Image: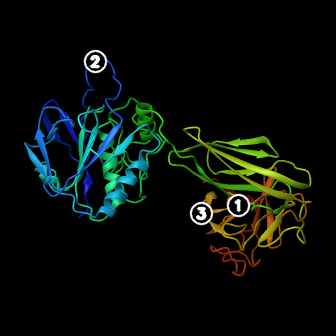
């Protein structure tokens, strides 16, 4: 059985179960907005005797036993029966999920000080009779539930990532966050992409379908920003960055492409391209690719700086040796081919020139060309007026003032896997007027 992380909306002293597709927006606490009551999340592991819960009109994690407004009478939550290894892996995952924020996650009882508490163990009917299929539950009213108590039930088995996902979602509900229709975010119902991390992205709300958010004026929610604004910065991690092409020390030709792969727990704000110590370009959206500027022959230092939304940065540097423009006969190595004097990945490279594609991101050149055939192919910009601007077995199809290199019928190119040994399945249709370029 799969369990869903449920949310209960508290209206005064009465608790109501919320059907999956129903949202009840509760007015925030009366009076001016106040600072959050605490930045501590206590992960309370229920031992063999269980966790006693007292039903009350307001949550209070400081009392003994804990007071919960969504409990159906005084209850006892059963033990968490997974191994110590599973527990420690789950605790570390929750710490990692909240690491970017000024939040302390602990499994040691803070005692009689303000804190949020996640009770972990038992089964959902230990707390309420109407949430039999819940994996977790939390009080929620679009704003902070001071000293809020939320729950993750021991229904996932030895699965620390699923436990972490539920703990992160339920604790965030007590900060005022809604469910999000965004698979990578802990506030989602969607499976996959574990472990999930809060995303710096305006996303629709909802569980199994996208809906307008009920707790915001924009109809969307940015979970990362909402927690960041409430708690402030903690120990955010810098982006990770790889320059996938060219490789360090490679001989390159003029205006070579620079392909990068940045990732971040939140989101990438922008990338900067630096050449020989000076910034020459900046991009703010994917695809994360630069084209090198005009450079003199010889050695050059190429740096790419990745800056995330918290302004943390990572820099990767390589050295390249720029030679003269290539020709069809010389200047490129390995699987590269020469296009307009520059070396590009050819038909024998995945995503190389001429390989079958369905969208631009399938191609290293980021250009998927529709030549009027059943299959589209990865292209590259060329000049129809320049002889040999495309490699053997390709022609330059005109489009306005420029063109695209496209495989010639019967030219021995190209397959989805990127092997030039496979024959072209369909001939090129006659007439460049049939050609059109697709941006996906």
Q: Which residue is nearer to you in this view: 87 or 374?
A: 87
Residue 287 percent across, percent down from the top left? 64, 51
Residue 259 percent across, percent down from the top left? 70, 56
Q: Residue drawn 65% across and 51% down?
A: 288
Of marks 2 and 3, the one in the foreground: 2
Residue where numbered disc 2 is placed: 31
Residue 394 percent across, percent down from the top left? 79, 69
The answer to whether residue 138 is visible is no
The C terminus sits in image quarter: bottom right
Question: Which circle's residue, 3 or 1, is located before the other in the chain?
Answer: 3
Of marks 2 and 1, the one in the foreground: 2
Q: Residues within 10 Å of mark 2 (few under 14, many from 20)?
A: few
Label ID, residue 358: 3
Label ID, residue 434: 1
**430 left or right of 131 in image:** right
Of helix, strand and loop, which one carries label 1? helix
The N terminus sits in image quarter: bottom left
């Amino acid at each position: 059985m799969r369990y869903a992380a449920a949310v209960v909306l508290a209206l005064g002293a009465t608790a109501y179960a919320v059907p999956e597709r129903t949202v009840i927006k509760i007015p925030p606490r009366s009076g001016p907005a106040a600072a959050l009551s605490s930045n501590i999340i206590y992960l309370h592991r229920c031992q063999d005797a269980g966790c006693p819960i007292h039903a009350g009109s307001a949550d209070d994690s400081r009392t003994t036993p804990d007071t919960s407004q969504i409990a159906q009478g005084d209850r006892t939550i059963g033990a968490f029966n997974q191994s110590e290894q599973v527990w420690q892996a789950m605790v570390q995952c929750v710490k990692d999920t909240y690491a970017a924020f000024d939040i302390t996650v602990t499994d040691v009882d803070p005692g009689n000080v303000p804190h949020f508490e996640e009770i972990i163990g038992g089964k959902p009917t230990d707390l309420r009779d109407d949430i039999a299929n819940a994996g977790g539950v939390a009080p929620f009213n679009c704003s902070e539930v001071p000293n809020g108590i939320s729950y993750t039930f021991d229904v996932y088995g030895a699965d620390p990532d699923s436990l972490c996902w539920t703990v992160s979602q339920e604790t965030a509900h007590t900060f005022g966050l809604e469910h999000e229709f965004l698979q990578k975010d802990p506030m989602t119902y969607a499976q996959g992409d574990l472990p999930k991390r809060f995303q710096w992205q305006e996303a629709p709300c909802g569980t199994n379908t996208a809906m307008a958010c009920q707790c915001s004026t924009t109809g969307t929610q940015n979970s990362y920003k909402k927690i960041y604004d409430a708690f402030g910065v903690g120990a955010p991690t810098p982006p990770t960055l790889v320059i996938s092409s060219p490789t360090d020390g490679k001989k390159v030709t003029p205006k070579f492409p620079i392909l990068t792969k940045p990732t971040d727990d939140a989101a990438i704000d922008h990338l900067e391209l630096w050449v020989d110590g000076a910034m020459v370009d900046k991009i703010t959206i994917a695809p994360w690719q630069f084209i090198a500027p005009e450079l003199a022959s010889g050695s050059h230092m190429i740096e790419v700086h990745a800056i995330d939304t918290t302004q943390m940065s990572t820099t990767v540097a390589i050295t390249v040796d720029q030679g003269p423009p290539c020709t069809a006969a010389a200047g490129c190595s390995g699987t590269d081919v020469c296009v307009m004097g520059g070396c590009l990945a050819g038909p024998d490279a995945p995503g190389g020139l001429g390989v079958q594609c369905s969208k631009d991101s399938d191609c290293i050149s980021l250009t998927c060309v529709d030549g009027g055939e059943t299959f589209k192919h990865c292209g590259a910009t060329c000049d129809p007026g320049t002889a040999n601007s495309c490699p053997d077995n390709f022609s330059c199809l005109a489009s306005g003032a420029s063109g695209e290199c496209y495989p010639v019928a019967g030219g021995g190119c190209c397959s989805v896997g990127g092997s030039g040994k496979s024959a072209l399945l369909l001939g090129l249709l006659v007439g460049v007027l049939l050609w059109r370029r697709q941006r996906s």
